[in-house]
Structure formats: structure tokens, C-alpha cells
Image (tube, grey):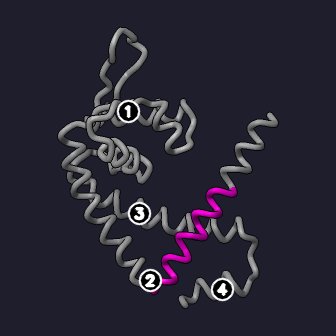
């Protein structure tokens, strides 16, 4: 086990803090990789969240995806999604097209530039994830994914209950 892992266990850190710490490290690694890989395609580097949103659009070809779909899929606020879409549109990564008779309803469409960027960045992210995954046995990885899934379900359930109370 890596030194950092020993330290987290020895300190008997609360679950939330440990999950937050690991999440921060993983996100920072991915964000650095995405920023590095995306520099050839856009003036600014791409953020991790922007990458995952673009990947979501890419993973749903032929489907009409709207801002509300991103809000639900990523559990982020309308204002956050709206600002992200504005910035990605300015960077030439997506367009928003009107649908039907409702001018307020805009389908999100990837540009060719975004498709090329996604190919390059996805290869780097996949390589990094495979390198991390290789540090676990098959059984350890399966257990990790099962436990993370359960933790996610528990927290989503608690969030739903809290929102219903408010």
C-alpha cells in the first residue's frame, strides 16, 4: 500500500474526509491530464467537468440532449450548466440549436473541433485510468467499484430525502 494510503488509515479519518481526499487527488490528476492533452485544440485548457460533459454528448449520438439533461446527469445547477454551455460555445466546442416550435429549447451539438479534442483527450484519460486500475487485483477493483456504487446510492438517497424535507 502506498504511503498516503497508510497515513489515511492510521489517522482514522472520517469517511467523508477520506472520500473527499481521494476524489480531490483523482480529479486533479484527470484535470491536469485533460488540460495538457487539450492545449492543441483550444486557446484555454479544458476543465475536467467540461470534458465529461462533452463525453456525455458524444456517448449519446443521435439523441437530443438539452441543458436539463446535463443538470440531471451531473447533478449540477441550471446556472452552472448554462455558464458552461456559453463558454464551450465561445470556444467552438458545441452549438445550441433550436428544436421544434420552442425557441427556448436548445439541443446541444458537438462541433468537429470537440470530436477531435475528445479523441485525443479520451486516449490519455483511458491510459491513466488503466494505469491506476493496474494497481489493484481484479477482486480488489470489483470490490472498490461495488462499494463506491453503494456509497453513491446511499448519498443520493439521503440527498433526495433532504430535498423532500425542504
Residue at the location (41% across, 29% down)?
Answer: 66
Mark 2 or mark 4: name the one nearer the start of the chain: 4
Residue 16 vs 61, above or below: the answer is below
- Closer to viewer: mark 2 or mark 4: 2
Mark 3, residue position: 30
What kind of secondary structure does the magenta stretch mostly adopt?
helix
Mark 4, residue position: 7
The residue segment tinted magenta is 136-154
Mark 3 or mark 1: name the one nearer the start of the chain: 3
Label 3's element?
helix
Mark 2, residue position: 138
Classify 10 Å Cα crowding around label 4: few (below 14), some (14-19), many (20 and above): few
Image position, residue 49 (x, y; %): 44, 49
Between the C-alphas of marks 1 and 4, the distance is 43 Å
Out of 3 and 106, give the one closest to the viewer.
Answer: 106
Residue 150 vs 161, above or below: the answer is below
Mark 1 or mark 4: name the one nearer the start of the chain: 4
Residue 121 vs 85, above or below: the answer is below
Image position, residue 133 (x, y; %): 41, 77
Label 1's element?
loop
Amino acid at each position: 500500500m502506498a504511503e498516503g494510503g497508510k497515513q489515511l488509515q492510521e489517522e482514522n479519518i472520517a469517511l467523508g474526509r477520506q472520500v473527499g481526499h481521494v476524489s480531490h487527488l483523482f480529479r486533479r490528476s484527470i484535470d491536469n491530464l485533460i488540460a495538457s492533452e487539450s492545449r492543441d485544440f483550444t486557446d484555454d485548457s479544458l476543465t475536467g467537468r467540461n470534458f465529461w460533459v462533452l463525453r456525455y454528448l458524444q456517448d449519446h449520438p443521435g439523441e437530443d440532449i438539452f441543458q436539463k439533461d446535463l443538470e440531471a446527469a451531473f447533478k449540477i445547477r441550471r446556472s452552472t450548466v448554462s455558464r458552461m454551455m456559453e463558454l464551450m460555445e465561445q470556444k467552438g466546442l458545441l452549438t445550441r440549436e433550436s428544436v421544434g416550435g420552442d425557441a427556448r429549447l436548445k439541443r446541444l451539438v458537438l462541433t468537429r473541433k470537440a470530436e477531435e479534442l475528445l479523441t485525443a483527450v479520451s486516449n490519455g484519460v483511458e491510459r491513466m485510468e488503466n494505469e491506476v486500475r493496474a494497481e489493484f487485483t481484479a477482486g480488489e477493483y470489483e470490490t472498490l467499484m461495488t462499494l463506491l456504487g453503494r456509497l453513491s446510492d446511499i448519498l443520493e438517497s439521503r440527498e433526495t430525502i433532504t430535498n423532500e424535507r425542504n
